Image: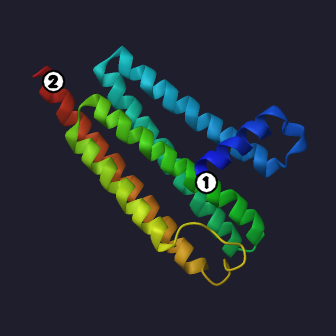
Amino acid sequence: MRILECQKEVIGTLLNPSKRSATERKRAYLFVAVYIVSFIAFCCHLLHFISGWIALLFVQMAQMIITIIYSFSIYDYGDKQTSAMECERTCNPLLDVYLVVRIFQIVQAVWLGSYLSTFFFVSAFIFFIWRLRKGGQYVDATSLWRDLKKHEVESYINLAMDIALIGAVLITMIFSIISKYD
């Protein structure tokens, strides 16, 4: 339900950008950019088999950029460059975008017919949901100063997982293309 509420805020921000803060506008534009990239990726599947794989790789790179922005936001708070409230308002929507993009990736991998990529993305999704349930991902402004190291470690785990997935997608893409045209 949190994602649906966030989408409602995004639509309200896009309809009346002058009534919203700069952070809310940036968050809304990020959601729109993610949806546009995902739509383009789905259109690439219709063009050619290889373009579908390249689109999957680009979406994974966009996923990694979201993780880097999340990590930098946590780091900026630790460096006393942003307030706890600003850090919370930046990081929590990024996690929602992260979940939405991961679901798009699972659908893309299924559409490509790659069981291995589907397994990688479903495993990463389940691991991320498990860590969300454990309570280490979403930022709370009232306790961020106490949990800063935990959030930094969680952001590094996300980053390592995304880098590993880029490598896995590259290897799977190469072998899939070779097996298709061999």
Q: Is residue 60 visible?
A: no
Say what secondary structure mark 1 lies in: helix
The amino acid at mark 2 is: Lys
- Please name the residue that numbered disc 1 is placed on: 2
Front label number (2 vs 1): 1
* Residue 87 located left or right of residue 117: right
161, above or below 50, in the image: below
Q: Residue 80: x percent and y percent? A: 75, 74
Relative height, residue 115 to residue 21 (above, below): above
Q: Residue furthest front?
A: 1
User: Which label sits on residue 14?
Assistant: none
Q: Quadrant of the C terminus?
A: top left
- Label 1 neighbourhood size at 10 Å, few (<14), some (14-19), many (20+)? few
- Residue 172 x/y as whole percent: 23, 40
In the rendered image of this protein, does residue 26 appear above or below residue 176? Answer: below
Q: Residue at x 17, y 35 (%)?
A: 175
Residue at figure coordinates x 61%, y 54% from the top left: 2
Q: Outermost residue toward the top?
A: 47
Q: Residue flagged by tag 1: what amino acid is it? A: Arg
Distance, label 2 to label 1, CA atoms, is 41 Å
- Badge 2, how many Cα within 10 Å: few under 14, some, many 20+? few
Q: Is residue 45 visible?
A: yes
